[in-house]
Image (spheres, helix red, strand yellow):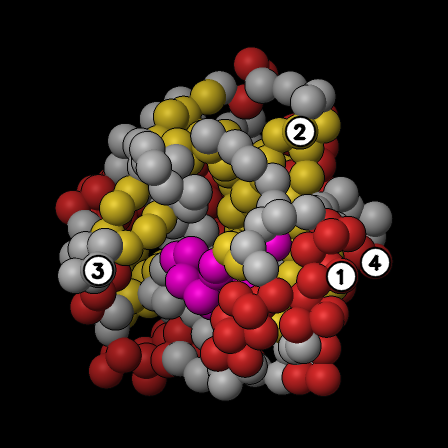
Amino acid sequence: MANIGVFIERYTVTRSEEMGALMKLGQVAHRLGHRLDFLFRADMYKIPQYDAIFIRALTDPMNSSYVAARLAQLHKLPVIDDPESIIICCDKVNMYRHLEKAGVPMPETVYLKESDLTEDYGARLLEEKGTPLVLKAPNTSFSMYVERVYNPDEFVKVGKKYLRRADRVVAQKYIHSEFDWRVGVLDGEPLYVCQYLIPKKRWKILSYTETGREIYGNVKGFELHKVNPKLLDTAVRAANAIGRGLYGVDLKQVGDDFVVIEVNDNPTIAEDEEDQKAPHIYEKLIRYLVGERGPSSGGNGNGGGNGNGNEK
């Protein structure tokens, strides 16, 4: 029997769908003969007492979740997410550089420094890449600090605003779509597939009203064997460019091809959403964490990678 610790923060359980997924994870762990406990920040000192750690809190090198990941790694425990993946995926410049090095298809991308944020350079990029252009701050999650710019003036204003958060800004060619593909990848193997539908009159899967209310699109699940193999192959290549842990790869479809928009560490797993057509998610996660392989498990159970946009 393995003792598995799930590190969470109070905000992790604000959505009933996410709490439902954690309950399913616990039920599967018990069915397989293991123990699963929830650990909060005050319980972090208990991490060395466990056999594996699964992080379900917002991952960032400045957050408690990173401390939990490092503590688990120092004690040689299997951990999702591993610290390396957190560092890479929480910096979009770092993440895109890894994708480029691996030859993963992605939108045309430029990395901007302060001296690039001029109206002349903005006009040139808008002409070369098309209008609008998407600007992203490197350290973002949940679609925040990602905006479209339509003219050189907006290019300068948004770019300088984002430079308050980092020393680089990502500029990408805009790809219109009515949904994003999301492929969950665990240890180099596809885990689940779904579409995040973009709400009407919006251009991102998650946006906010002026009052701060969140607007989500619906989630549509697909069986792995019923989607284009090229989608899965592209997602796996992107995940492997980061590490061998758990990732949520976002892709846009362009004709018969796919381009990677982002690789997220700590991807959202919510009841009746990502698991719609993939009820095996929970068993595969448990078996990976405890180092088991079986007919319904994937991965080698090495507990992390050499490694994401993170989401939690």
**Which amino acid, by three-letter code, is at mark 4?**
Lys
- Which residue in the structure is indicated by mark 1? 124
Nearest-to-viewer mark from 1 and 3: 1
In the rendered image, the vertical position of residue 299 relative to residue 192, given as above or below: below
Instruction: Mark 2 and mark 4 in contact? Answer it, CB < 8 Å.
Output: no
Residue 231 image position (x, y, % from top left):
65, 29
Mark 1–mark 3 Cα distance, whole angstroms, equals 32 Å
Mark closest to the chain's N terminus, 2 or 1: 1
Residue 252 image position (x, y, % from top left):
59, 36
Question: Is 46 in front, or is 264?
Answer: 264
- Which residue in the structure is indicated by mark 4? 101
Counting other residues with Cα less than 10 Å from the Cα at mark 3, is it few (<14), some (14-19), or many (20 or more)? Answer: few
Mark closest to the chain's N terminus, 1 or 3: 1
Q: At numbered mark 1, what does the secondary structure look like: helix, strand or loop?
A: helix
Could you tell me what secondary structure mostly forms the magenta stretch? loop
Task: Tell whether 65 sits left or right of 209.
Answer: right
Instruction: Mark 2 and mark 3 in contact? Answer it, CB < 8 Å.
Output: no
Nearest-to-viewer mark from 2 and 3: 3
Q: Which residues are magenta?
A: 133-147
